[in-house]
Amino acid sequence: MKTNEIRIFCPATIANVSCGFDVLGLALDSVGDEMVVRKTNEKGIKITKLTGQDLPTETLQNVAGVAGLALLAESNHVGGFEIEIYKKIKAGSGIGSSAASSAGAVWAMNQLLGSPFSNLELVKFAMEGERLASGVAHADNVAPALFGGFTLVRSYQPLDIVKIPTPPELYATVIHPQIEVRTSDSRRILKTSISLEDGIKQWGNVGGLIAGLFTNDYNLIGRSLVDHIIEPIRSILIPGFDKVKEDAIGAGALGCGISGSGPSIFALSKGKENALKVAEAMRNVYEKIGVDYDVHVSRINTQGIKILES
Amino acid sequence: MKTNEIRIFCPATIANVSCGFDVLGLALDSVGDEMVVRKTNEKGIKITKLTGQDLPTETLQNVAGVAGLALLAESNHVGGFEIEIYKKIKAGSGIGSSAASSAGAVWAMNQLLGSPFSNLELVKFAMEGERLASGVAHADNVAPALFGGFTLVRSYQPLDIVKIPTPPELYATVIHPQIEVRTSDSRRILKTSISLEDGIKQWGNVGGLIAGLFTNDYNLIGRSLVDHIIEPIRSILIPGFDKVKEDAIGAGALGCGISGSGPSIFALSKGKENALKVAEAMRNVYEKIGVDYDVHVSRINTQGIKILES
C-alpha cells in the first residue's frame, strides 16, 4: 500500500559560498524545518498549518504552495496535497528558509506520487517558490536542499546542476545576528560590472574550491574560500562582519563568508572540534557588540531532504 | 655517476582553456620542442644552438636563458649550463612556444642538479621567460608544461597551482592558421571590466569543467567549455573562427575555443577517432578560405616534460 502522508526534514542551506556567488550552495544537517505533506482527492494545494514563523498560508502567497502548484501542473495526479509547515529556520536569516519550504513541498509530493520527477525537475518547481520569495528564481539554495551536499549551478539556461562531493570532516558554523538586512538592499548595492582582474581571481578560486572538495584537500578549500567581488560590498550591511571573519579564521576556520545575502555568516572547518571553537569565537563578537544571535554547528548534509516518518 | 647532460621533450600547451581564461592550461603530447641541457663549470647560461625558428640566442634575450638565470640565482651550483634548443613549436602560434623553452630549461637544469626545486618553484623561474616573451609573467602555459595534464593557476599572489586529473579518452585537436595575431593586439582589445552576469556564467562553467575532469564526465566537460567573456572579443582577430568552431562541434568535438591568445584554435574530443574527424573539419575550413595551416591531434600529456636521453 502506497503511503499518502510523509513527514520530512528540510535542511537549511548556505548559498553564495564565498567565490561561488550565485552558483555554489551546500546543505546543513543540524538546522532545518519539518513538513508534513498529505495526498488528497481535492484539487490544488492547501497549507493547512504553519507554525514557528509569521508567514502567509494562502497557497499563492506561500512559497511551498507556489512550488507545489508548479509540480502539480506537470503531474498526472488528479487530486491535490495538504501541507503542514513547522518552521525552525527564521525567514530572512540568509540560510534558505524559503528554499527549505519550496524544496520540501515538491520533494515530498514527488515521493507520494512515486517519484515521477528527477531532482533537476524538482529544482525547477522549487525555483518558483524562490521567485515568489525574492523576485528572482534562483536555484542555489533549493539545489543543495534537494541534492544534498555541495551543488554547483553550472548554468541557468538550460538549468544544469552538478553535485560536488563533500569531504568527510567538513563542518559548517553559522551565526545569525538578529539584524534585518533587506534582500532588496543587499541586491541593490551590488555593481552590475566587475573588473576582469577580479573575475579571473574569482574563477580561479571556484576551480580551486571544486578541486579541493573532490580531493578532500582542506587547505586548498581554505585557500579558495575567498570572495573578491561580492563580500567586500555586502559585508558593509552586516555589523561586526570583519571581526567575526577575522576571529573565525583565527580560531581555525578554513574560510568564512556571508551566507546567502546575509545577515548570517558561515565558516567551514575541518572537524567538529574546530567548528565549535569557531562558533565560540563568532559568538564572542556579537556578545561584545550586544547583538542577539543564533549559532549552528553542523555537518554538511550530503543527503538533502529526509523522510522522518511515513 | 650523475649525468651532466639530458635531452628532453618540452610539450606545447594550450592556455586560456575556454572559460578558464588566465587560469586553466593543458599539455599536449604530439607536438613540442626538444632541448639538450648540459651542466658546465663556466658560470651563467649559454644558448649554444637554436634551430627551427629565428629567435635570439643572447642569454638575456632568450626565454630559456632568462628563466635559467632565475633558477641559477637561487641554486648552489657554482658553474652554469649550456642549452641547445630544437624548436618545433612555431613562435606566435598560441600553443606555448616560449613556455616550452622556459619550462624546459629550468626543468632540465633542476634534473641535472638533483632536483632541489619543486615544480611550483620551477614555474616561478619559467615565468621570468614568459615575462620576457610577452611582458606578462603568466603561468598558464608553463604550469601544464611542468606539471603535465590540466593545471589550474588558482592564484598568482601567492602563486598556487593545482593539478587537475585528465580523463583517459580526452584528445585535443589544434589548428594553427598561418596568420599573424600580435599578442599586444589580442591583449589590447580585451575590456578591463565585464558584467557580473557574464562573470557568474564563467565561474559556473569553470566549476563544471573542473568537476567534469574529476569525474570523467565528457558531456559535462563539453557543456562547460564555454567562454562568455574573452572569445567573443578575441575571435574577431581570427578569420574563420566561427566556422571552425561550428564545424568542429558538428564533427563531434566536446568544445572548441581559442588556444592562448590565438591564432591557434583548439577542440577537445572524446577518443582519437573523434579528434581526427574534428581535425578534418577544421582543415576543410582553412582549405576553403585559402589560409595555410598546421593541424595537431594529441592525447593530453599527463606527464609534462620528459627525458628523451641522458
Image (spheres, coloured by chain):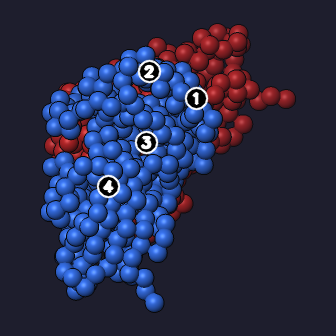
Chain colours: A blue, B red
Point out the frontmost of discs 2 and 4: 4
Decide which of A307, B138 is in the foreground and name it: A307
Q: Chain of mark 1?
A: A
Sequence-wise, the earlier of marks 2 and 1 is 1
Residue A300 in the image: x percent, y percent? 51, 49
**Residue assigned mark 2:** A287
Report crowding for label 2: few under 14, some 14 to 19, many 20 or more residues within 10 A (C-alpha).
Answer: few
Sequence-wise, the earlier of marks 4 and 3 is 4
Report crowding for label 3: few under 14, some 14 to 19, many 20 or more residues within 10 A (C-alpha).
Answer: many
Q: Residue at x 42, y 35 (%)?
A: A294
- Distance from disc 4 to disc 3, alpha carbons, whole Å, reads 41 Å
The type of residue carrying mark 4 is Thr
Sequence-wise, the earlier of marks 1 and 3 is 3
Q: Residue at x 39, y 55 (%)?
A: A33
Residue A41: quarter of image? bottom left
**Residue assigned mark 1:** A277
Is disc 4 in contact with disc 3, using a CB cutoff of under 8 Å?
A: no
Residue A262 in the image: x percent, y percent? 31, 35
The type of residue carrying mark 1 is Lys
Residue B239 in the image: x percent, y percent? 17, 48
- 2 and 1 marks on the same chain: yes
